[in-house]
Image: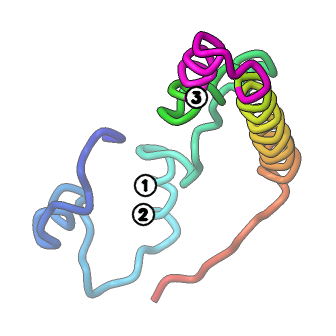
Amino acid sequence: MAESLWHAKEIAALLQELDVDGHVRLDQQDAQRCLERYGYHELESAQAASPLTLFLSQFRNVLIIVLPGAAGLSAIVGEVLDATIILIIVFFSAILGFFQEYRAERANTLFGGTTVSYGRGR
C-alpha cells in the first residue's frame, strides 16, 4: 500500500479502497483495523551518511567541479597565485558546506524522534 499514489486518486476510490465511509467517524475497532493493516503514520528513517560521504558530496556542484579546472588553467598560464586562491576558496566552501550538512544531520537525528503530535479527526 505504501507505493500507492494516494494524492492522485479520487476521493470515492480512496474511500472504497480503504473500506470506510467518508461521512462517519471511525470507531475504535475500525481504527485498530486500519492501524494493523497500514501501520503507524511515521516516516521511515534513512541511514545517516558518513562524514566522508558528506564531505565528498560537497563536490557534486557544477561550479565546484569547474573551479579546479579554472585553477588548473590559471596555473598553466602562469597565474599561480590566482590558482592557489581559487583552490583555497573551493576547499573552504567544501568545508563550510560539510559542517552545515553534518550539523543538520546530527540535529535531525537527535530531534527526529522527540516530537509527538496528536490529532482528532472529525
Bin the neighbour count of mark 3 within 10 Å (Cα to Cα): few under 14, some 14-19, many 20 and up: some
Real-space Cα distance between discs 3 and 2? 60 Å
What's the image's color scheme? rainbow
Vertical position of residue 64 compared to residue 16: above or below: above
Within the magenta stretch, is there residue 70?
yes
Q: Quadrant of residue 67?
A: top right
**Residue for badge 3:** 67
The amino acid sitting under disc 3 is Leu
**Residue 103 drawn above or below residue 28:** above
Tally the marks: 3
Q: Give the residue number, with chain letter if any, for mark 1.
A: 34
Quadrant of the rendered structure where residue 59 is?
top right
Q: Position of residue 37 (x, y in %)?
A: 41, 44
Q: Which residue is mark 2?
A: 30
Q: Nearer the viewer, residue 108 or 7?
A: 108
The amino acid type found where label 1 is placed reads Cys
| Main SS class of the magenta portion in the image | helix
Horizontal side of residue 26 vs 56, given as left or right: left
The location of residue 107, given as percent across then percent down, is 85, 49
Which residue is depicted at the point 55% across and 24% down?
70
**Element on which disc 3 rests:** helix
User: What is the span of residues highlighted in magenta in the rendered image?
Assistant: 67-82
User: Would you place residue 122 above or below residue 64 in this image?
Assistant: below
9 displayed left or right of 36 = left
Query: Viewer-proximal residue, 93 or 16?
Result: 93
Query: Which mark sits nearer the N-terminus, 3 or 2?
Result: 2
